[in-house]
Image: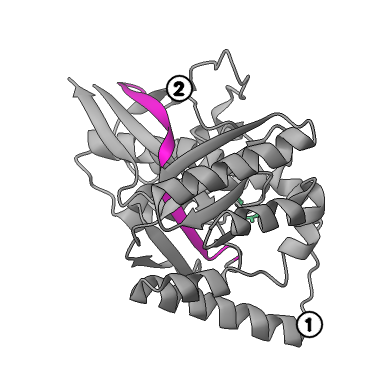
Amino acid sequence: MKVTVLAPATVANMVCGFDVLGFAVEEPCDTIIVTRLNERKVIMEPDPIFDLPTDPEKNVSGAPLLAMLEAIDDNIGFSVKLNKRIKPGSGIGSSAASAAGVVVAANAMLNNRFSNDELIQFAMHGEKVASGVKHADNIAPCILGGITLIRAIHPLDIVALPAPDLFVSIVHPQIEVKTADARSVLKTRVELKDAIKQWGNIAGLVAGILQNNHGLIGRSLQDHIIEPVRSILIPGFDLLKEKCLDAGAIGGGISGSGPSVFMLSATRAIAENVGLAMQQSFDALAIQNHVYVTRIAPQGVRVIQTEP
Ligand code: HSE
């Protein structure tokens, strides 16, 4: 049996919600094919473009499937072929798409015996491989679609929020920022005055999403803790943000751990203009870049083909 899925890119953090908020986008998506084996093992087909590890324990798709196999007695295994369009290290949930996509495909072979929460737990093993930490703010929206709030990880408590009809501009500058490095530069202590601003913004953002209140969403897309540290890794970040807001964006910031930057806009026309401003900003710095203009995706990983 063979199952093919489309796994979407995701934007983690949503600026103020470090490790607790994230959303899925319609584009780009990875295509992932999982084939059932009659042996308890996981095989990663080599990736000619990105040279990803083929040892399943060291692979972001392999580790979640090994965790899934541990939870079942069946004499089955999986062979995985990734067709990656979400570039590893781009900051738009490449590892999450690889991890979430395979567990949804494998679950389809198992007559959907695992719940979404269980799939999220398996897929988080992939994030551990990628960055050393089991965060769910890419995995959960990748599986569930829309915007998700990770209220807690132990035990897992995920709240699916309604996806507002917003457009998303994302720029991926061709510079490398590893999630593990972008986490290691963060301070481990937070000033109370910054924490107060931050939780005001997280609450404001969630309220704005529930009320579909673009003004409140925009005012809340501010980060007093993470962005001031991480933005140093993205050349021209402050000016880029200013230009995007001038072009009409509601707000935005670093996507996940970067280097990609995202902005939300009310219409596709504005989002296209914002995308242009993004491109021009990195062109002016002679940094190659790729821009996506897309939408918040109401749906997460999708099974597109099942072959007996
Ligand atoms: N919340 C994670 C981080 C997302 O910012 O490190 C990584 O994509």
Q: Earlier in the sequence, mark 2 or mark 1?
A: 2
What residue do we see at 66% from left, 46% from top?
A: 131
Magenta segment includes 38: yes
> Which residues are drawn in magenta?
18-39
Residue 284 image label: none
What residue do we see at 49% from left, 34% from top?
A: 61
Residue 191 image label: 1
Residue 253 at x, y percent in the picture: 63, 57
Magenta: main secondary structure: strand
The picture quadrant for ligand 1 comes to: bottom right
Q: Could you tell me which secondary element the residue under label 2 belongs to?
A: strand
Establish if 4 lies above or below 154: above
What residue do we see at 59% from left, 25% from top?
A: 55
Is residue 36 rendered to the left or right of residue 139?
Answer: left
Residue 287 at x, y percent in the picture: 75, 32
The amino acid type of the residue labelled 2 equals Asn
Establish if 102 lies above or below 25: above
Residue 138 at x, y percent in the picture: 50, 51
Quadrant of the frame with the N terminus: top left
Residue 83 image label: 2
Residue 268 at x, y percent in the picture: 40, 47
